Image: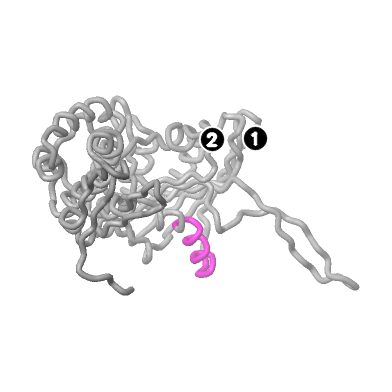
Amino acid sequence: MINLYNTRIEDLAIHRIGNKNKGELLYTSSKSTLLDDEMHSLLKEYFLKPFRSKEEAYYSFYHDTDLDFHDMYAFAKAIFSTPAILLDKSKEIAKHLYEQSVHPHIRSGELYVCYFDNVMVDNQKTDAIGIFKSELKQDFLQFEEGDIELEMILQQGVNLNKLDKGAIIFNVAEENGYKILSVDSNRYDAKYWLESFLGVDVFEDENFFTKKYLKFCQDFAKEVVLPAEDKKEEVMFLNRAVNHFAKNDNFEETAFLNDTLENPELIPEFKNFKVEKGPKYSIEDVSEFPISNTAVTQARKGIKNVINLDTHVQIKMDFTNPDSAEKFIEKGWDEERQMYYYLVYFNREEKK
């Protein structure tokens, strides 16, 4: 979990990156940009707003051989070691981005490299490096008073309500390539920002594995449990899966299967499905890991607890009391009508 409320921009360098293939130039500033209180407030909101509502899917710098050969990792490590060299290192970052700006669709724009202080990551106070790029310009009107009329002037500028590209490098997990968050609103070349420039891969922590494993369980429920059992059991399996994650600090697959699959015949089906689908979720060799409560909460919100029937009737199950569906809902077959039915037991109708 990240908290950016008290974060401050301690240093900022701004450069302009052209498209190298189009003959556009690289312009680097020779000094840092000073910010008054108003500009600090505006830029902080511009830079950080997209990350406040973002699901925490962290990345980290990655290199096939060794991180010491990774340019961006080296730049970040140097800045964290000596924040005063941010301007010099930001020029190298700008040059690195310029060298990657060769695709014909890549737009020129301003690059902002800043040093943040007072950042909270997983309840740990640290510092961070922000790298942001503005690309799209919008038309706006300025007005000046003339001798006999109000003159209208058309200009172009950056919309501070929408960040085009950005990354925050948190000064944690240095040995693993740091924890990094990234946004990219203009995905005209998906590899340009994440792969060519940043050179990152998914950061495989407890948040990553918890999210991936629960997403895998959703597919297993839909593709295996539903055909083998029924819609009720599909929904209940997912509820039991989330509850298992919620009440445990560490995940162990055997305990999970025994706790969530009431039909023992589905256990080998689960293991076969994992062999088949596991690589898609990067969990093929994963059977134990710490559990992320944040990821469990997010997963619970995405699980549907409604059974939709072809008779235009819906049955909604309350997962606050998950045993209710097990105890008070029965499924059967009516021979006379040749239809399935759900039998629901209750004492009284609640008035809400």
Pinpoint residue 324: horizontal percent, then vertical percent.
19, 59
Q: Mark 2 and mark 1: span between their CA atoms?
A: 10 Å
Pinpoint residue 70: horizontal percent, then vertical percent.
35, 32
- Which residue, given by chain and number where applicable, does mark 2 sit on? 98
Indicate the quadrant containing the N terminus: top left, top right, bottom left or bottom right.
Answer: bottom left
- Judged left or right of residue 338, residue 325 is left
**Does dot 2 land on a helix, a strand or a loop?**
helix
Q: Is residue 68 visible?
A: no
Circle 2 packing at 10 Å, graded few (<14), some (14-19), many (20+), is many
In this orientation, which residue lies closer to the viewer: 95 or 168? Answer: 168
- Which residue, given by chain and number where applicable, does mark 1 sit on? 24
Pinpoint residue 268: horizontal percent, then vertical percent.
14, 29
Q: Residue at x 30, y 38 (%)?
A: 222
Q: Which residues are magenta?
A: 36-48
Q: Amino acid at mark 2?
A: Tyr
What type of secondary structure mainly makes up the magenta span?
Answer: helix
- Judged left or right of residue 75, residue 274 is left
Q: Is residue 274 magenta?
A: no
- Judged left or right of residue 237, residue 79 is right
Indicate the quadrant containing the C terminus: top left, top right, bottom left or bottom right.
Answer: bottom left
